[in-house]
């Protein structure tokens, strides 16, 4: 509803309807507080809404000046502007802090317009008041929050920010902390000028997930919490962590308050811990813990699909002489070479693990659903592994302070195979079966593939 623009030639003519949005409305029922005063600023009329706003009855208002709802806490500059407008007979509109009868402060959006007679002289004034306390409180709270965000952003390596998505889908960053340059390589002014920069630098593999998580937060007004990577030109990929709280604004926009911090170091540390926990440090292969986890998953998948899997246990023949003749550094180089050869013989979906020493295990998943066919597939892969491990070795062994040494050890492998389907046997029993077959190959002279059962 537009504010009424009354124009009275006579202050006593108070019941005259005025036009509001094309309709004639009585001044008594307007949703605004209305005062009419003479040219000395003495109030001659107050409508019911003004009495409700202030807590003063009509009899307590009439005959007083408008300043009776002001106090020393009211902004002096605004009071002076009101006096000047009334003295000069000019229009005024502004926000002013007023006080109710019980002393409660309230913010008043005040409009004062002079009333002129037929000769153009000012006979009085009409004042229109609207209580905007809630809006002002929201603005003050936002200003305090904004100030706190600014201060916080100056003392923390994290980037404080406000992000807004409007109902039409456009977006902006009303606030970006100074740490933006450290975090994403752009200054606050650059981000404000082109908000898309913040999304364009997200790693392609993470971009869709980040935006979907923002939209989900917008839809449900739930906190946005996300780890993602950014890829800046000429720099290594870095990890960021974002955390913010959304709120719905009166125009339907969504505004987030939050922060983004660089967690690359933490992610690298987590990856190192993961490597120590699940991977063999020498070869980079899965260790016993990770292997058992993947075997259990494969057994569950096999139970659903009906396809067989296979376990292949591998033990190197004649590995001990390598350590004895050339030293443990040479043994380590050979184990790393064995790991590489094993990985080159299987699919990416299969698992190669080192259990310790020269003991390796391979798990094949998703073989045939027919017993004999799956066993044939496992034997074929095992023979491929045997051939790879029996091929000539040319290993370079580095010695500190000495020239590199080239060695050519001779080695083969003993291999045992056991197939499994579903969870008919537990993981330990499946491994024991393959291990038994491997030891049988070892006893028979090595360089052989044996299956369980015979």
Image: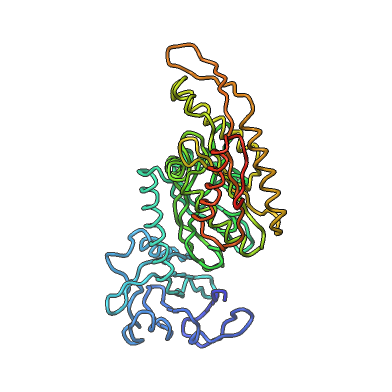
Residue 17, picture quadrant? bottom right
Give the position of the N terminus as an image quadrant: bottom right
Q: Is residue 62 above or below residue 290?
A: below
Q: Is residue 76 above or below residue 291?
A: below
Q: Is residue 127 above or below residue 431?
A: below
| Residue 381 placement (x, y as % from top left) | 67, 43
The one nearer the camera, 117 or 262, is 262
| Relative to 245, 202 lies left or right | right
Residue 202 visible in the current orientation:
no
- Considering every residue shown, the one lying at the far front of the view is 444
The one nearer the camera, 119 or 233, is 233
> Residue at 39% across / 49% down in the picture?
150
> Residue at 56% across / 58% down in the picture?
213
Q: Is residue 398 above or below residue 444?
A: above
> Residue at 50% across / 52% down in the picture?
292
| Residue 326 placement (x, y as % from top left) | 47, 20
| Relative to 392, 158 lies left or right | left
Residue 100, picture quadrant? bottom left
């Amino acid at each position: 509803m537009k504010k009424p623009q009354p124009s009275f030639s006579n202050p006593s003519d108070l019941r005259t309807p005025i036009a509001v949005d094309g309709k004639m409305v009585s001044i008594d029922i307007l949703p605004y507080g209305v005062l009419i005063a003479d040219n000395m600023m003495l109030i001659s009329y107050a409508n019911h809404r003004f009495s409700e706003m202030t807590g003063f009855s009509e009899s307590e208002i009439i005959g007083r000046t408008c300043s009776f709802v002001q106090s020393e806490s009211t902004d002096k500059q605004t009071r002076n502007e009101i006096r000047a407008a009334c003295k000069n007979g000019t229009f005024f509109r502004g926000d002013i802090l007023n006080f109710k009868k019980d002393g409660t402060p309230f913010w008043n959006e005040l409009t004062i317009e002079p009333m002129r007679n037929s000769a153009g002289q000012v006979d009085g004034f009409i004042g229109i008041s609207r209580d905007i306390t809630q809006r002002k409180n929201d603005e003050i709270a936002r200003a305090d929050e904004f100030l706190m965000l600014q201060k916080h952003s100056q003392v923390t390596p994290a980037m404080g920010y406000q992000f807004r998505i409007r109902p039409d889908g456009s977006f902006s960053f009303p606030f970006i902390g100074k740490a933006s340059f450290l975090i994403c390589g752009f200054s606050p002014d650059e981000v404000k000028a082109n908000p898309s920069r913040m999304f364009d630098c997200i790693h392609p593999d993470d971009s869709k997930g980040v935006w979907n998580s923002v939209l989900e937060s917008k839809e449900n007004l739930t906190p946005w919490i996300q780890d993602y990577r950014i890829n800046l030109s000429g720099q290594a990929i870095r990890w960021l962590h974002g955390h913010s709280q959304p709120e719905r604004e009166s125009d339907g926009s969504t505004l987030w308050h939050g922060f983004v911090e660089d967690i690359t170091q933490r992610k690298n540390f987590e990856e190192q811990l993961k490597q120590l926990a699940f991977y063999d440090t020498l070869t980079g292969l899965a260790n016993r813990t990770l292997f058992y986890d993947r075997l259990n998953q494969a057994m569950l998948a096999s139970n659903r699909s009906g396809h067989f899997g296979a376990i292949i246990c591998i033990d190197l023949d004649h590995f001990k002489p390598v350590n004895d003749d050339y030293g443990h550094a040479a043994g380590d180089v050979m184990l790393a070479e064995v790991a590489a050869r094993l990985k080159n013989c299987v699919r990416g979906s299969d698992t190669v693990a080192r259990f310790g020493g020269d003991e390796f295990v391979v798990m094949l998943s998703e073989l045939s659903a027919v017993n004999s066919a799956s066993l044939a597939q496992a034997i074929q892969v095992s023979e491929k592994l045997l051939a790879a491990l029996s091929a000539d070795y040319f290993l370079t062994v580095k010695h500190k302070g000495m020239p590199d040494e080239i060695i050519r050890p001779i080695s083969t492998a003993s291999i045992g195979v056991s197939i499994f389907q579903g969870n008919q046997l537990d993981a330990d029993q499946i491994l024991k079966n393959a291990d038994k077959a491997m030891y049988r190959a070892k006893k028979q002279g090595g360089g052989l593939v044996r299956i369980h059962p015979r």
